[in-house]
Amino acid sequence: MQSEELYLRPAVLSDMDMLFELANDEAVRKNAFHTAPISYEEHKEWFRKMMEDDSQLQFIMMSGSLPLGQIRLTRDGESAEIDYSIIPEKRGMGYGKKMVQLMKELIHREYPDIQKLTAKVKPSNAASIYCFEENGFQEIFEQYEFDIKALKTGED
């Protein structure tokens, strides 16, 4: 990663299949808050809506002509929530940290109305926790959930 030029480019229609494969990657699904696989039809509809939604900013991190991952912002007033993922063969090499850094710089330059970035990360996702902490993010709170269906089935 030392000598390669990394940059973010806006997502385009031809990124749809790459984003579909990345979204359904086993590790990505495990670290997602909704872990069920995504059908291609669901993805196509989501992608279409996302590309038309001004509150969604979808970027692809590139090294030359090679896509390394995706990073998306969901804007809500002066805040924006980050969602990112790295292609499987490039994980563990520092690309997540670099992608978040590039996104911070891009926001600073091109989106002055965004004043705060947030990210939701599962406690088990050590790589993302590290990535955000290394980029100056601070843990604000933990959220606990209980699946009420467990009461109905007798599970804990």
Image (tube, rainbow, N blue to C red):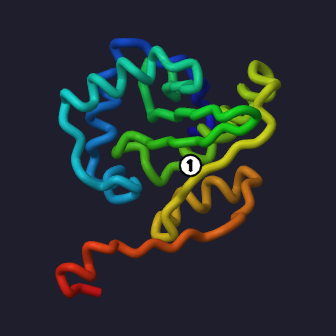
Quadrant of the drawing holding the N terminus: top right
**Left or right of residue 138: residue 156:** left
Name the residue located 40 percent from the left edge and 75 percent from the top edge: 146
Quadrant of the drawing holding the C terminus: bottom left
Residue type for callout 1: Gly
Residue 39 or residue 136, whichever sits in front = 39
Determine which quarter of the picture holds residue 48: top left
Name the residue located 47 percent from the left edge and 54 percent from the top edge: 92
30 lies above or below 77: below
Residue 38 or residue 61, whichever sits in front = 38
Q: Provide the secondary structure element on which disc 1 rests.
A: loop
Q: Furthest residue to the front?
A: 152
Horizontal and vertical percent position of residue 105: 75, 31
Horizontal and vertical percent position of residue 104: 72, 35
140 lies above or below 24: below
Name the residue located 59 percent from the left edge and 38 percent from the top edge: 99
Mark 1 packing: few (<14 Cα in 10 Å), some, or many (20+)? few
Determine which quarter of the picture holds residue 33: bottom left
Residue 143 or residue 73, whichever sits in front = 143
Q: Which residue is mark 1?
A: 94
Name the residue located 32 percent from the left edge and 74 percent from the top edge: 148
Horizontal and vertical percent position of residue 60: 49, 26
